[in-house]
Image: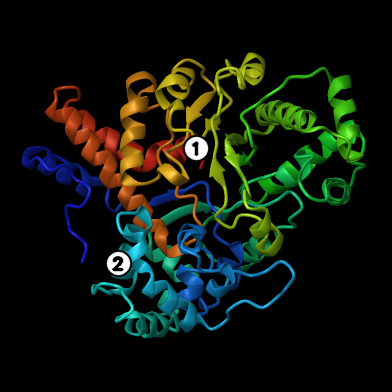
């Protein structure tokens, strides 16, 4: 079902070069420095319940497409925040997925799913309504076997290290269980402080109060609040964290006087911030987090430009992160200037920028990363982590930022079995791009082999200090 030369150039000579490059990187270990897999999987190492809860229920790439065609999320087993009824029969969910699999034609999701079927479960027929039960029964039988439990798949996938992402309110019990188990798999956490740095996050004051309790300090005072961050960051670092991650609506940063920042914080706690003041506070906290990174060595990741949870109805019924994060226009040049004025020339700091605004690649992101020592470009993300999106990213950023102001690839996924497929797509696309540079006289072949290795493995490992 899968073509061996998929995603390689059409022209035969360049295709042959791409194939040769790819053969040197296809089996390199996977470094997955940013993602959303559930650490509980690796802590308990229990069998995945059924195919639907492996491929459909946790994967917003999958269920958002089905939702776009009028299929209710509840029918796909997506939990409701009020505990109301959703479909729990995995086979029914699976059949609904199969009946509508044609919706994924031409999408990266289809490629990831089909490669997972083939490489993980040995299924090479076309997935459809006619083969749905055959696929379901085969995968379910596999999942009952020890070699398909989370830890065994982790090792089979060749994952060297994977980072999950947790709120600072998380006690990291699953990471502690992994540590106590003695298992050698490396699963680290990452610090995602959105619930306590975003005044518009639901329950902000209660979150800050709980934050202080966990840190053992009064986080409702400005200095106590900053100290709580330092304490919780140190706690996360003790569980392997090397990065923080910030999903803000805009790329705005600020470097406010401390008295002004403290006054904004008081307004945020009182629930009196205007939208502009909330954005200013988030922006100031990015600069505070960058300064803390200079102290503790964390890499700072910024994921701006998403109108998160765009559907109020879906948010109310199913909660956050259910496929309704929509890209918006994003300004980086002006928005990042306060942070860059403060710390942008510090080479010991790493700030990784992501974008959902593809128009900013060559106009803003590449020139910024091509000048400031602290900046690196994260890979094409979410709507652009398709083969075409990855290719455009390389074409539009390499000319100004080069390869070594980027950080390789991260899969940013909740769908565990898609991890090797996603990395494979990235490796194929990069090898295809390098083959084109060789064919057009812009890169020597021996250099291309070195770059291919760096893009597939070394850059992510180095940038994330793993």
The quarter of the picture where residue 180 lies is bottom right
Looking at the rendered image, the quarter that the N terminus falls into is: bottom left
Expressed as whole percent of the image width and height from the top left, the position of residue 137 reads: 38, 85
Horizontal side of 200 relative to 152 (left or right) equals right
Mark 2 or 1: the one toward you: 1
Q: Look at the numbered disc 1 and give the secondary structure of its residue.
A: loop
Residue 182 seen in this snapshot: no
Q: Residue at x 58, y 81 (%)?
A: 88
Q: Position of residue 324 (x, y in %)?
A: 57, 52
Q: Secondary structure at mark 2?
A: helix
In the image, taking residue 364 as reference, residue 457 lies left or right, namely left
Residue named by callout 1: 356
Q: Residue furthest left?
A: 12
- Image location of residue 300, percent across then percent down: 60, 34
Mark linked to residue 9: none
Disc 2 versus disc 1: distance between alpha carbons?
30 Å
**Would residue 135 appear left or right of 184 to someone viewing this image?**
left
Q: Is the residue 452 above or below the residue 444 in the image? A: below
């Amino acid at each position: 079902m899968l073509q061996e030369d998929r995603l390689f150039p059409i022209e035969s000579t360049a295709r042959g070069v791409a194939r040769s490059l790819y053969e040197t990187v296809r089996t390199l270990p996977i470094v997955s420095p940013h993602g959303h897999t559930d650490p509980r999987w690796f802590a308990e190492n229990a069998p995945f319940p059924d195919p639907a809860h492996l491929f459909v229920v946790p994967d917003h790439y999958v269920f958002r497409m089905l939702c776009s065609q009028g299929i209710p999320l509840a029918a796909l087993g997506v939990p409701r925040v009020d505990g109301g009824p959703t479909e729990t029969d995995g086979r029914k969910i699976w059949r609904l997925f199969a009946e509508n699999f044609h919706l994924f034609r031409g999408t990266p999701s289809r490629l990831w799913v089909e490669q997972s079927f083939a490489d993980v479960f040995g299924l090479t027929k076309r997935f459809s309504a006619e083969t749905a039960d055959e696929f379901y029964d085969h995968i379910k039988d596999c999942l009952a076997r020890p070699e398909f439990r989370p830890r065994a798949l982790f090792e089979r996938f060749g994952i060297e290290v994977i980072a999950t992402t947790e709120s600072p309110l998380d006690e990291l019990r699953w990471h502690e269980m992994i540590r106590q188990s003695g298992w050698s798999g490396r699963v680290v956490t990452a610090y995602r402080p959105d619930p306590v740095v975003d005044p518009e996050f639901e329950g902000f004051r209660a979150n800050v109060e709980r934050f202080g309790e966990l840190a053992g300090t009064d986080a409702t005072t400005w200095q106590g609040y900053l100290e709580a961050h330092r304490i919780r960051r140190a706690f996360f670092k003790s569980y392997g964290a090397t990065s923080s991650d910030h999903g803000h609506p805009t790329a705005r940063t600020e470097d406010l006087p401390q008295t002004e920042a403290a006054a904004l914080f008081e307004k945020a706690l009182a629930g009196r911030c205007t939208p502009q003041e909330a954005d200013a506070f988030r922006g100031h906290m990015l600069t505070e987090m960058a300064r803390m990174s200079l102290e503790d060595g964390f890499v700072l990741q910024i994921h701006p430009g998403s109108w998160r949870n765009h559907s109020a109805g879906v948010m109310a019924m199913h909660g956050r992160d259910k496929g309704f994060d929509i890209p918006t226009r994003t300004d980086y040049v002006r928005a990042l200037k306060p942070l860059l004025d403060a710390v942008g020339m510090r080479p010991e700091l790493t700030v990784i920028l992501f974008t959902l605004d593809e128009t900013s690649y060559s106009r803003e992101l590449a020139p910024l990363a091509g000048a400031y020592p602290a900046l690196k470009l994260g890979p094409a993300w979410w709507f652009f982590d398709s083969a075409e999106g990855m290719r455009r990213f390389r074409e539009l950023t390499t000319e100004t930022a080069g390869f070594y102001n980027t950080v390789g690839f991260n899969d940013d996924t909740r769908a565990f079995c898609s991890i090797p497929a996603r990395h494979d797509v990235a490796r194929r696309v990069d090898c295809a791009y390098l083959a084109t540079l060789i064919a057009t006289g812009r890169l020597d072949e021996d250099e291309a082999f070195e770059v291919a290795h760096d893009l597939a493995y070394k850059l992510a490992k180095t940038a994330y200090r793993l």
